[in-house]
Image (cartoon, helix red, strand yellow):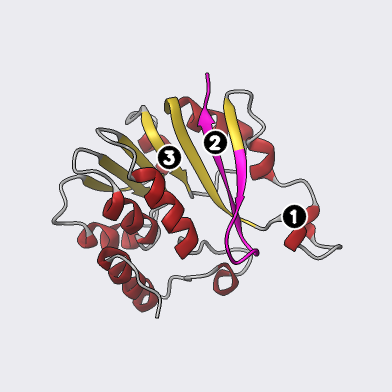
Amino acid sequence: MEEFPPLVARAQALARQAGFPLTREEAGPSRPSACLPDVGRFLAMLAAGCTGGRIGELGTGAGIGMGWIASAMPADCTLITAEVDARLASMARELVAADPRVEVISGDAVGIMSSRGPFDLLFADSGIRDQAGFDALVSLLRIGGRIVMDDLTPRRAAAPASLLLADDLKRRFFTSVRLATAEVVLPDLQNSLLVGTRAN
C-alpha cells in the first residue's frame, strides 16, 4: 500500500466521504478532481524549499493538495488556500485547524489571492480559463516564484484523434514571456503538469 503523509491520508478519507473525485477518471470532463499523488509529491518538493515564504493554492477542493504542501513546507512558511465551495472549504479548514501556518478561505480564489501576494509558489487548480486571469496570477508571483498547473495529458499519451491534441489553454498560458516553463510528465505517463518560474 502506498504511503502518504498523515494529513494527506486524512484529506483523502474525507474526500471519499464527501464524494469528491480522487482521479480525473472519476471526475469526468466537467467536475474537478483531487490532487494526484505524484502531483502532490512535486508540490511537496517545491514547498520544502520555500523557507520564510508564502504559498497560495487556488482551489482547495477536499484539501489533498493542501495536505501535501503543508506537510512539507518549513515551519516559517505560510499557506493561503481558497475554495469557492463553502462545504469543501469548511472540511479543509477542520483538517488544518491546529496548524496556524495554514489559512483556508471560502470564496473566489483569484479575488482572494490578488490582495495576499506576492507568492513564492502558486498551485493554480481553480479552472482559470482566460489569458487575463492567468496573467494576473503571474503578477502575484515574486521574481523567482513558481506557478504549477496540473490535470494535463501528455501529448504522446493521447490517442491520434483525441481532442487533447487540439490547442490546450493551459499550455497556451504557459507561453508567457515572463515565465521560464516546463511540462513535467508524471510516472504514470498518462498525466502531466506545467511549472513556470517568474523571470521578470
Classed neighbour count for the residue bearing mark 1: other residues with Cα under 10 Å, few (<14), some (14–19), many (≥20)? some
Residue 17 position in % (x across, y down): 35, 78
- From this view, report whether residue 192 is shown above or below residue 33: above
The residue that disc 3 covers is 122
For disc 1, the marked residue is 155
Q: Which tag is nearer the camera, tag 2 or tag 3?
A: 2
| Label 1 – label 2 distance at C-alpha | 19 Å
Residue nearest the observer in this picture, 131 or 24 = 24
Against 78, residue 35 (above or below) is below
Read off the magenta span. Answer: 182-200
- Front residue of 118/48: it is 48
Amino acid type, residue under disc 3 in the picture: Leu
Q: Name the residue under label 2.
A: 196
Name which quarter of the figure residue 49 lies in: top left
Between the C-alphas of marks 2 and 3, the distance is 10 Å
Q: Which residue is drawn at 46% across and 35% down?
A: 146
Disc on the earlier residue, 3 or 1: 3
Instruction: Say which amino acid is labelled 1.
Output: Arg
Which x, y percent locates residue 76?
Answer: 19, 38
Q: Does the magenta stretch include residue 40?
A: no
Q: Which of 25 and 106 is in front in this view?
A: 25
- Residue 199 on the magenta segment: yes
